[in-house]
Image (spheres, helix red, strand yellow):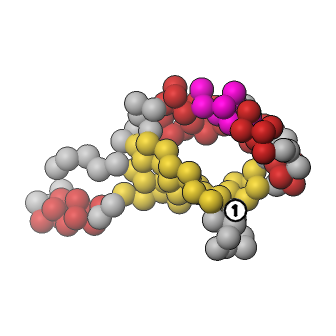
Amino acid sequence: MKNRPFNIVMLLNANPQWLALSREERSQFVKKDLHPIFDHLSDRLDLKFYDSEYFHSSFSDYLIIQTYELDAYQTFIELLRDTKVYSVPFFEVKEIIIGIENQFEVFDEQFKKGVA
């Protein structure tokens, strides 16, 4: 059976240190500090960023990360930890949710074969 990608939802909340920056300072930080990380892993991770402060009170932003390689995700987190995202911190990681779409189908197939 074909491997299925891991889908990772990372719920974040912007901290006052991030919000205190001007919009230009935020843009420069993303360009200078984060884009190199995104570019470095772009062949192994698909990253999508969403704003949610308008719709949810517990988190302001979230990422959806898709990868076939969990070590690429680990590298992403380790590189983020070396930035002000974690060190100031600009954002608090509220929750990380990892799943595989319809993974029960793989189990069912293995179960029928007596492998599971």
Q: Nearer the viewer, residue 111 or 6?
A: 6
Disc 1 packing (10 Å; few <14; some 14–19; many ≥20): many
Give the magenta-colored segment's residue range.
Answer: 29-36
Residue at figure coordinates x 88%, y 49% from the top left: 20
Look at the image and say whether residue 30 sits in the magenta stretch. yes
The residue under the point 16% across, 62% down is 109
Q: Nearer the viewer, residue 52 or 113?
A: 52
Residue 59, given in percent of the width and then of the height, sits at 69, 65
Residue at image location 80% in from the left, 37% down from the top: 25
Choose between 63 and 32: the one closer to the eye.
32
Check if residue 62 falls in the magenta segment: no
**Which residue has dot 1 on it?**
60
Count of marks overlaid on the render: 1
- Asked whether residue 57 is in view, the answer is yes
Disc 1 residue type (three-letter): Ser
Q: Is residue 48 left or right of residue 77?
A: left
State the quadrant of the C terminus.
bottom left
| Residue 86 visible to an observer of this rendering | no
Residue 56 horizontal/vertical position (percent): 67, 73
Residue 111: quarter of image: bottom left
Q: Is residue 70 left or right of residue 16?
A: left
Q: Is residue 45 above or below residue 20?
A: above
- Choose top left, top right, bottom left or bottom right for residue 30: top right
43 w.r.t. 97: above or below: above
Q: Residue at x 42, y 59 (%)?
A: 99
**Residue 72 image point, x, y percent:** 48, 35
x and y, in percent, of residue 81 in the image: 70, 37
